[in-house]
Structure formats: structure tokens, C-alpha cells
Image (cartoon, helix red, strand yellow):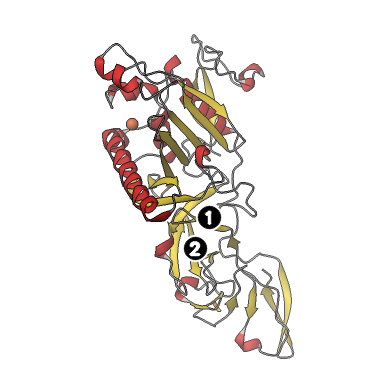
Amino acid sequence: MYAATSWCACANWRQIPCSRSRAGRFSPAPGRRRHKVDTRVFNHPEAVVQGWYWLARSREIRRGQVVSLRLLGRELAVYRGGDGRVAAFDAYCAHMGAHLAEGRVEGNALRCFFHRWRYEADGRCSDIPCLAGQARPQISVRCWPTAERYGMVWLWTGETPTDDLPEVPELAGKACDALVANRFRKRCHPNVVLINAIDEQHFASVHHLPGSILTMEAVPRSVSNIEFRNLGKVPTSKRLGRLLARFYQGPLTYTLSYWYGSLGTVTLGPDFLHLHLMFALRVGDDGSTEGQTLALTRQRRGPLGWLVNRLLLYGTALAARYFAWGDTRVFETIRFDFRHPIPADRAVLAFIRHLESQPLARWHEIDRTGARPRPTRMRLAGTDQESSDG
Ligand code: FES
Ligand SMILES: [Fe+2]
């Protein structure tokens, strides 16, 4: 369903072993050492990798408010209950399909505006006013797991999360301060946007960094997470390089952690001060990227800590804007077609290969009304009538 063609150079470069090519599942292209790879995930708008995706800024969903949101082509009704927790339902009521964002939050539940059925935060229908005092059928709307961190609301595109929310590796398990920076749109798929940050060549051609400064090594961490770290050192042939090299004992710090092909963290900066960014991306209805930039730092105590963190976070967000600005032209016009990889594309190939093995969510297969087709008998005022059982 998602088959498309791109070129793989794994037969040429042993640094990126490819077990699938050894198994002979890919056919060498005639007259070439390169051969074709059928990608089912990479750069396909319909393929939704199971994972965490950004839904909205936390402040966009106030306590007691329900909003209509669209995520990866799916309509949702998202509300914050009286206990402050966010619940995300498929948008359409299990009764007749009214949009639940037209409804009203009652405590921790959501009531449909049309016939006033009430749904608890787990999606279970707990009240049907016209059946007061009578047996109520087991009905529910689909409810998606949500989480809240970094000033954002996140949604897991499956039944039960198998990962914690992604973190910057250096900040894992630590309390963080976050700045929700710019929201952006790019005219290409999120996978292509993420490629940009591990594309060694463009740092010289677009961002004018010395050519040998980046040599990215790919380190898969889990089925959903791959890390890239730089092994290149600051070149000391020029005076500026010699000055910069004083701040790096080893390679220039530039470490990325990618999740689901749509979320990337970046750590950069001299040894005494690391800056951390998160780019949370998702594909929009037109196949473009809807992105949210987050600046992160470890929590520091006291008023001085607060001030230091504000300065750090705004500085980090500015640095992100500077680098993103240089790439704007590429994202506006690119039609990604990876025909001739070269050795400098090692990291890009490793990213694509890792993404191809990630589990897909059944995001587009699940009935969007939330009602399951199996009919059940519902007794109403002494007569048997058919209803859908959620
Ligand atoms: S459509 Fe929602 S209660 Fe009838
Ligand atoms: Fe760039």
C-alpha cells in the first residue's frame, strides 16, 4: 500500500550493514551497484508510525474547555476536565455522530450537545438521559492516550503507550524547563525535514560550516529511537577554529535523538554549556509538515536559576530559528527523490532504514465514529430495537 521507490547504497558501504539486502529481498538495478528499496513508511503521508505526536499547546486547552483538533487526518474532540487532565476522543458521538467538541465538559466527563449522552474520560458512556432508570447499553467513543509535558499536550497513536514521552538523552529523568517556541509549516514530509539535521553535506553548502566538522554516527537505541552523534572535531587550520577548539575536548558536540521519524532532539554547544532543542513534527492534510519547536534546559532553582533558564531558553530558540531560516528554500521546493546516495549520506540512509522497521499505528483503519459494527439488542420501552455496541 505504501510502496514507493528510493535508492539504497547499502551494498556499497559496509558501514551501514543491511540484513535485508543480504537476504536477497531487493533486486539490484541493472547495470548499477546501487539497488532499489521499497519503502513503506519513509516519506509516506498515509503511514503513521505508532508513537507520541504533539496535539496542542497546553494553554490552548483550558480547564473545562473542549476543542476540536485534527491530528494526522483524524478529527478529535479534546477537553480538559475539572481535575486538569486532558482527554482526547474521536470527534463523533457514538449515538448519531454529532461532533463532541460542540458539547460541554461536566466535571471530568464530556456531554454531547445533541441528545446529551455523557462520556467519561476513558470514553465510556455513563449517562443517556432518555434512558433514566433503565438498562444502558455498553457504549463508548474511542479515547486516545494523552500526556502533557514541555508545555504541550501529546497523543499516543495506539491503544497503550509502549514508550515514555521522548526526552533529550542528556536530560533523561531530570526535571526540565521548557519554552514553547515557534510553530512552523514546511512544504515537505516530516521525515524529509528530519533528514536535514543529519545531512552532513548541507552544513557546508547551506550553513557555511567547515566541511570536515561533522561526521555523523548512527546508533539505534530501540525500535523507535535512533541517535546520531558527531565524531568530527573543530578544524584548527584557521584562527577561529583554534579558538573554538578550546571549548571542545573531543568532537564538536552535535547529538540528535530521533523518534518515530517525526520527533527529533538536538544537543549542541561547547563543553561548558549544552543547549537542547526538540522539533516535534507531524504530517498535515496536504502532506506538509506542521512543526513545533521547543527549547529545553534542566531545571535550576531560585530566582537566579529562573533568570538563567529564561536567557538560555530564548537563546536556544534564537539559534534554532537561525539554522531553520537557512533551510527554508530547500523545504519550499524539494521533491525528495534519493536516487544517488554517496558515502556522505550514511546517516540519512541509516535513518531511513531504521524508520522502515518501526511499527505502524492502525490510525487510518480504526472506525472513526468510535462505534463498533457489532449490533446488540437494546430494550426500549418494552420493544426490542437494534443499536450499535461500542
Ligand atoms: S448524537 Fe450525541 S447524544 Fe445523540
Ligand atoms: Fe540545515
x, y percentage for residue 140?
A: 64, 70
Q: Is residue 320 above or below residue 247?
A: below
Label 2 packing within 10 angstroms: few (<14), some (14-19), many (20+): many
The residue to which callout 2 is attached is 76
Q: Residue at x 41, y 49 (%)?
A: 284
Helix, strand or loop status at disc 2: strand
Left or right of 178 on screen, residue 9: right
Earlier residue among tags 1 and 2: 2
Type of residue at label 2? Leu
x, y percentage for residue 129?
A: 61, 87
Q: Quadrant of ligand 1?
A: bottom right
Mark in front: 1 vs 2? 1
Type of residue at label 1? Leu
The residue to which callout 1 is attached is 155
Left or right of 71 on screen, residue 325: left
Are the two marked residues, 1 and 2, in contact with CB atoms closer than 8 angstroms? yes
